[in-house]
Image (cartoon, rainbow, N blue to C red):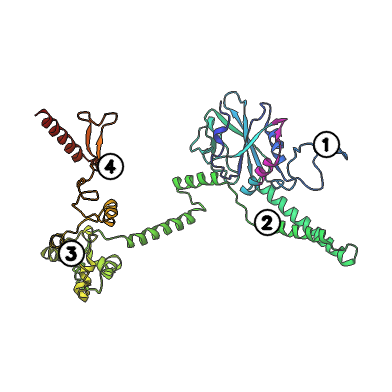
Amino acid sequence: MNSGDSDASPNGAPSQFLLLRGLEPTVTEDLLAKGVAKLYKPSRKSPPQDAPNLKKGSAKVASTTGDANLGAKEGSIRRVLLVRDRRSNESWRYGFAEFATVDDAQAALIRFNSFDKFTISSKPVMVDYIHAGVFVPVFDASEDAERFTFSPLTNSAAKLAYWDEGAYVNELVIFTVSLDASAISNDTQSKSVADIAAAAAEGEGLVKPGKENDAKAKKRKAEATASSKPKKTAPSQLQFWSDRHAELHGIQSDNLPEQKEESNAKRNAADSSAENETPKQTFADPSKNCCYLCSRQFKSSAEVNKHERLSELHRKNLKDEELVSKAKAKMAKLGLSNSPGDISEYRDRAKERRAAFGASKTTSLPMKKKTNEKHSNQASEPEQAPPPSKGASLLGKMGWSAGEGLGAQGTGRTEAISTDMYAAGVGLGALGGRIGDAVDEAERNTKGNYEDFVGRARDKAKERFQNMG
């Protein structure tokens, strides 16, 4: 059985109908109407009956009466609709309440949200807006199906039904439009008499005007202006299906002129957008800034493009097949295409600028020297001797010169001590313990190139070959 959850508006769009779910099975249309009446804005003269009597010093109790400043206008509920089963006539435990305006339904829902717990027949219920597909129109209904339909209050000719074929809505009309209008007129008349009496009392000095009286006068004036405003007679959901019914059956509707105005506005917007669109074929020459179809010359390509999009002469000539064929022949003779895709190709504006105003002055930049000249200069210059080491400079200060032996008589060794590198853990006299020159090995280990590895392996092989001999 449907619980009514699918009838709630998914996006919370306001409507004149409120959905009430979670009712007791014994709730009738009268009990539902009395429960929905709690969403009225309470009058200030009579305090709510279920308000707890709090004594001085007693603990506060959570209020279940809602905010007294919120709620729909009294008498704004037009009717309630209880969903019942078509076969058993049992309640499906949810229903709907139709308000006079969307603002009244919004105020009622705001008052519902202000309650800590809103109950009908001592059971908490949920209140939401409905979506536009809850009530659907019925055309040419049979006699058996007609008793499951209802009509909008403002259009008795249209027939609506609940979307679920296994149920129907039983309505209870609370206030009709005519009764509400008469109530409003009586209310305005009574208020006007009260205003006259109050003004007479103030004039005789019996009543002193104060802030409270001013506030009441302003409130009466605001209510009078609000009642004089035209009210929407039908909800948006019902009006939508009424307009569709009138459109299908050729009946004159009040909203048809507005729809015609909207369609005319859309058509004008489409015409303006069509004017701004790029033409399907072009007869312009971007290099000469001319139109071969109209035989006209322009100052720039922008004017040519504007001419093809907005010119009435160009549109008129497009309908003339003879002019179109001649223009195509001219463009084919010059090797041009009339498709608009060719115009969007790259255009060398710098080349056109150079052709019109001449080339700009070129600035000469310093050129880099060629590598061949650099190598020739290095070859012509004599190689400089490497600077002496620290030890050689110290020996030179003591009178030693390069090529001489060490010692006072110069009979010592003339060659420098070689810095050899040996394998770790091998003695000085061991065969094959010497790896090589320490400087070279350090450089090789730092670089780690493959060529150094190949050279080192070659030297080792050569050394082993010499030791074999």
Q: Are marks 3 and 2 in contact (CB under 8 Å)?
A: no
> Dot 4 lies on which element?
helix
Residue, far front:
409
Taking depth in this image into account, of 408 and 125 the one nearest to the observer is 408
In the displayed structure, does residue 139 sit left or right of residue 109? left
> Dot 3 lies on which element?
loop
Q: Residue at x 73, y 48 (%)?
A: 69
Q: Residue at x 28, y 69 (%)?
A: 302
In the image, which residues are magenta? 107-123
Q: CA distance from mark 3 to mark 2?
A: 93 Å
In the displayed structure, does residue 50 sit left or right of residue 391? right
Q: What amino acid does circle 4 point to? A: Thr
Residue, far top:
88
- Kindly identify which residue carries mark 3: 369
- Kindly identify which residue carries mark 2: 226
Circle 1 crowding by C-alpha within 10 Å: few under 14, some 14–19, many from 20: few
Q: What amino acid does circle 1 point to? A: Ala
Circle 3 crowding by C-alpha within 10 Å: few under 14, some 14–19, many from 20: few
4 or 2: tag closer to the N-terminus: 2
Q: Are marks 2 and 1 in contact (CB under 8 Å)?
A: no
- Kindly identify which residue carries mark 1: 59
3 or 1: tag closer to the N-terminus: 1
User: Which of label 3 and label 4 is nearer to you?
Assistant: 4
Taking depth in this image into account, of 169 and 467 the one nearest to the observer is 467
Q: CA distance from mark 4 to mark 2?
A: 95 Å
Q: CA distance from mark 1 to mark 4?
A: 88 Å
Q: Quadrant of the C terminus?
A: top left
> Dot 1 lies on which element?
loop
- Kindly identify which residue carries mark 4: 446
Residue 329 screen position, x and y as percent: 12, 64
Q: Quadrant of the N terminus?
A: top right
Residue 446 screen position, x and y as percent: 28, 42
